[in-house]
Amino acid sequence: MTWGQRRWRRWAAGAAGVVVVAGLAVTTAVPAVAEANGVGATPAMGWSSWSFIRHDPTAADIEAQAAAMVSSGLSSAGYDYVNIDDYWYDCPGSQGPDVDSYGRWVTNATEFPPGSGGGNGIAVVASYVHSLGLKFGIYVTPGISKQAVTENTPILGTSYTAAEIATTTSENNYNCGGMTGINYSAPGAQDFINSWADEFASWGVDYVKLDGVGDSDIDDVQAWSAALEQTGRPIHLELSNSLDIANAATWAEYSNGWRTGGDIECYCSADGSSYPLTDWSNVQSRFAQVAQWQPYGGPGAFNDYDSIEVGNGPADDGITDAEAQSQLSLWAMGASPLVLGVDLTQLNSTELGDLKNTAVIAVDQDGIDASRIVSNVNQQVFAKTEQNGDVILGLFNYSGSTSQTVTVSLAAAGIRGRATATNLWTGASAGTLSGTYSVTLGAGAVQLLKLVPAAGTTGPTTYDAASSANTLAGGAVVAGCNSCLDGEKVGYVGDGGTLTFNDVDVSAAGTYAVQIGYLDGSSGTVGRSATITVNGGAVQTLTFVPTGSFGNPGSVTVSLPLKAGENTVEFSDSAAYAPDFEAITVPSAATTSVTGYLAASSANTLAGGAAVQSCSACTGGEKVGYVGDGGTLTFNRVNVSSAGVYPVLIEYCDGSSGDTGRSATITVNGVVVQTIVFTPTGGFATPGTVTAYLPLSAGANTVEFSDASAYAPDFNGITVSQ
């Protein structure tokens, strides 16, 4: 199973069938258990009043937004819901919303006046929205108003009353208050919700947002689901907010979508206005949610990351144009509803173009939740595989202040060999990609790519760390992990505990670019370490980059020598704990050597004291020492056929004590690229390896190792692969 296929495994038990496209098995059915009310096959698109209008909705305002949705061309792009959020009803005080003679909320007739022929003011607005070819939504919260209980209103069509179904437990109503719970085992309880749903249906409601939902409101969710279905009108049911992931299956069974977190709005204006609508930190909070909730969304029932705050320009939106594209891209990768929160009558032309980008909308409407395959502090990458085998890749700079170079192994996204790439925001070709791919992104920026694999390419194989085929020893155990593959990881590796993958099977011997999925909650920039042993021989000790927490997966790619057939790959640390492990992903083919092995002691430039030394354990029996402290080692003939970022395997010796070894600055063609802190190998005659990803130009390149103030490790050689 590839990383791009994760979200499909969750629904395999209920799948109607599986097709194989470009070597990837992709399910063709909807989730096994999802709301079956005839709506929500794709994520909802539209507009909601809360972000911009908030507590002052009027009929005129809602109708103006509906008209602007059509005149702007947004409706032609697929945005079709026009939803009134809170404050459409009378709220006289702390005893809850005003109620009619049957205990249901009363419309604020001042702001939503009846039509000339009478009737409900909400129904008048709904009729206007429908006349434009759009759909209409409304807001409600669980329970029954205390006013209905106090008045003991009858329940329509029954002999029961409000007091007979009410409990003494308070229910959430964020702005009016005064809602109390319903005892759904009491006769008349479901009838009450049915009567309310029937009223909404008679007004022309197409969408109901049930707000204030928590674990204690499952009965309300079930009741509203049944009530809306019995109306005979297709009505979308959306749940809000900060739903519990532990009950994801329940939300999927009884609703079309659920808010995974709190409000996207920042509520940060100095003058009490709606602007700015949000800020980058609120958008940032959704990255972890998209990763954690990925297994649970699908056709009929989707993860909802809240409103899209894009359209009124950076000053009013509260996010830059780059961050706006990132919000839209992240929501699209997560197959979230695209419900706008901006003022549609004052749209910024640039952002309107972004909102109508049909290629990005198609990524959202495919209904597939992307997996996070890179999470290295400010570098985030999500990927998903379309049913036709195309791969969508979203590369994000999480930082809102500095540029970042984001690098991803295409194997982790399900691409082996080559793929043609298209930038979905610009429509321009991004060339033919293979191996690893890097892009430098400005603060808060994104690159959204569609990759079409070349014919005949096959995907990698992912080995789950928690699989029973592996060997766990010395304290290593399987643990739950909501955001991990199949909800599990292996912890307590190291300090004597080991994790061994026993059946890593490849068809031919060679060096493979293996992606390691891990979790490391260490503080700072340097994480835990692990020694990687292949077929009984230690290959390298790798120091990991912290991922933010032990519930937040990240990934790193290393080069491992594998033999044809089955291999064992072990992770250990004799003295301290290693990270937790989620999986390893092995490509279908070994990397192809471009330049072969370049010995440090041959045909290179040594300066400032660097010197060739004997080393019986090193390749060729030699190494270069005294690099650093002014000494430099320069590889002069690093030749590649085309420009790109290449994995470079560095063989070195470092006899430092402790967990942290010496450092070296790597310069490519005269430009400093990065400084690596090496992991000690156990001695200056004991070789180890680490892989760096270096940008190389077509033709000959120079790669220099140096340290201006201290000694670097000794170097044996480098191998450049693609």
Image: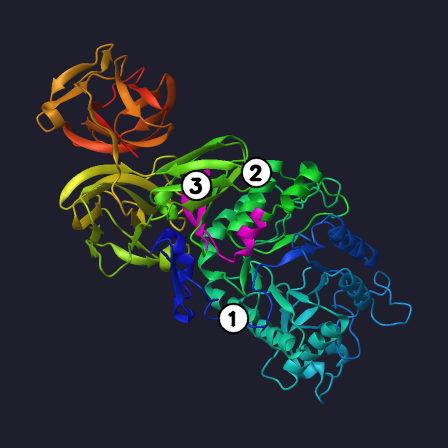
Q: Is residue 635 left or right of residue 380?
A: left
Q: Tell which tag, 2 or 1, sits nearer the viewer.
A: 2
Q: Earlier in the sequence, mark 1 or mark 3?
A: 1
Q: CA distance from mark 1 to mark 3?
A: 39 Å
Label 3's element?
strand
Q: Earlier in the sequence, mark 3 or mark 2?
A: 3
Query: Where does the magenta region start and end?
Result: 359-386
Q: Is residue 432 above or below residue 265?
A: above
Residue 426's tag is 2
Label 1's element?
helix
The quadrant in which residue 679 appears is top left
Label 2's element?
loop
Q: Is residue 189 above or below residue 587?
A: below
Residue situated furthest left in the rendering: 616
Label 1 close to label 3 by CB (< 8 Å): no
Position in image of residue 67 (x %, y %): 78, 54
- Any part of residue 358 in sight: yes
- Number of marks drawn: 3
**Residue wearing tag 1:** 253
Residue 420's tag is 3
- Within 10 Å of disc 2 (Cα), the crowding (few <14, some 14-19, many 20+) is some
Position in image of residue 438 (x %, y %): 42, 34
Q: Is residue 683 above or below residue 199?
A: above
The quadrant in which residue 638 appears is top left
At a point 57% along the width and 65% down the height, the residue shown is 256
Q: CA distance from mark 3 to mark 2?
A: 15 Å
Position in image of residue 577 (x %, y %): 26, 45
Q: Earlier in the sequence, mark 2 or mark 1?
A: 1
